[in-house]
Image (cartoon, rainbow, N blue to C red):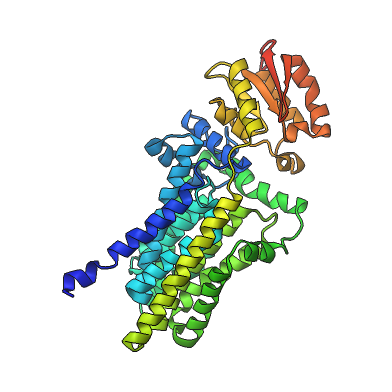
Amino acid sequence: MTAALRRCWPAAPLAGAIGALSYLLTRQLDAQSVSDEGVYTLSVQAFAHGEALGRDVFTSQPPGFYLWLRGLALLLGDSLHDLRVGMILTVALGAVALYAVGHVFGGPLGGLGSVAVLAVASPLAISGARVYADTPAYALASVALACAALRRPVPAGVLLTASISAKLSGVTAIPPVLAVVWVRAERDWRPVARCAAAALAAAGALALLFVSDLTALWADAVSYHVSSFTFAAFGFDAWHRLERGQGWITLGLFAAAVAATLLRGRRLWPLWLWPLGAIVFVAGQKPLHDNHLLVIPYSFACACGPALATLLERRAPRRAALLLALGAAAAAGAYTQALHWSDTLVRGEDPRLVAAAAQLDRVTKPGDLVVSDQPIVALLAHRRVPGPLVDTAVLRFLTGSTSPAAVGRIVETEPVAAVVAGRAFAIPSLARALAPYLRRTFAHVLRLPAATIFYGRRALVSRS
């Protein structure tokens, strides 16, 4: 094999692995939406129409996530389907970065192993293409780790801040990034200092960009989530949900990687700091949702790929070939399990909500503002939502982030053409509190299986 072929041979299997991963994720493109996806899609639409994050738009994640979504919307479009395509591209970016990390620590096979582990971890098969802040956060963390492995501490620091600015759980990547910078610099602390300084400078620049809205952003993205802990039990079910979401082959690969590290790859310890941080995060998250498990595939992939590659080091050619064949068979089996898991859990949109969206489209006009406690209904009807009410989850009322009176005032004083009540607004206590505002504002009520639509505005109340 010539030197050129030796350098290029991983390109074909890498492209195949990323293609298989992307195919797995495309099965989620038309899947039933979850509330958060609708919230984020409505948020980026409001952001695109000039409403300020925090000040005008309820911003439950750090602003970097919305900047990322805005970039994807400019490139692909701002529908839920468009943004899901953008999430697949984001995962592919993370996969390339993880290949680079694995290649540095375990050669081409280490890089390919990292991509393979990412592709077979079932949290990605369930939630990887959904519009969640977790995806860009961990993809950017993977790129930061790649820069650290390639001895680029300044870009690593900037990208680490970008990761945290997308979702606060990006902090789980701080220890491995700094440790990799230190190890790759042969235990010289100066590159670590440059990395940290670059991260702080990037954070300062981001704060200056949103300086007039920092208080509101903190209240929405931090205080709101801290308050929500009061209303959720401690997530002891994290371990059960994580084990249930993994096929036994995938768990076997994880176990083999840990054993390989202990036996032959102790130099890989910086990479294992991310899985350790991920486990602590998942165990302590309250409440625990499927998107919170997305940190598992990224963090374990960065460490497992090069760890598994160490099993082939200093092996006789025949034994190495046998182990490689066994590894490829295990990856293929785990991928098949991920496909099956995806097919089992991925469902189409609720037809009752589709019907409600059709009725909302009928009783309102294009360009009208509406308020909906089922975000997908507004999205399917192609209607915008006032920024403060892009998220009307029950938790917002429980935590005091909003109130029935605040919702009612916006409905009365903004040109809201209709209100859809099918989730939070249908809870008896909230329904009673909202009823006076809705009766004063709307002349007609349409009762459907999945929602009640209030429409036919009587008059616009003066803000004064």
Image location (x, y in percent) of residue 101: 38, 68
Q: Residue at x 52, y 40 (%)?
A: 30
* Figure quadrant of residue 444: top right
The quarter of the rendered structure image containing the C terminus is: top right
> Whole-percent x and y of residue 398?
76, 42
- Residue 99, image x and y in percent? 37, 65
Q: Is residue 43 or residue 303 the one in the foreground?
A: 303
Residue 343 spot, x, y in % from top left: 56, 51
Horizontal side of 173 relative to 216 (left or right) equals left
Residue at 54% over, 62% down:
337
Residue at 43% from the left image edge and 56% from the top image edge? 21
Residue 354, picture quadrant: top right
Q: Is residue 391 above or below residue 309?
A: above
In the image, residue 438 above or below residue 18: above
Residue 156 in sight here: no
Relative side of 350 to 170, left or right: right
User: 141 or 84: nearer the eye?
Assistant: 84
Residue 59 as seen in the image, left or right of residue 298: right
Q: Is residue 340 visible?
A: yes
Dividing the image into 4 quarters, which one contains the N terminus?
A: bottom left
Q: Residue at x 76, y 30 (%)?
A: 404
Q: How many marks?
A: 0
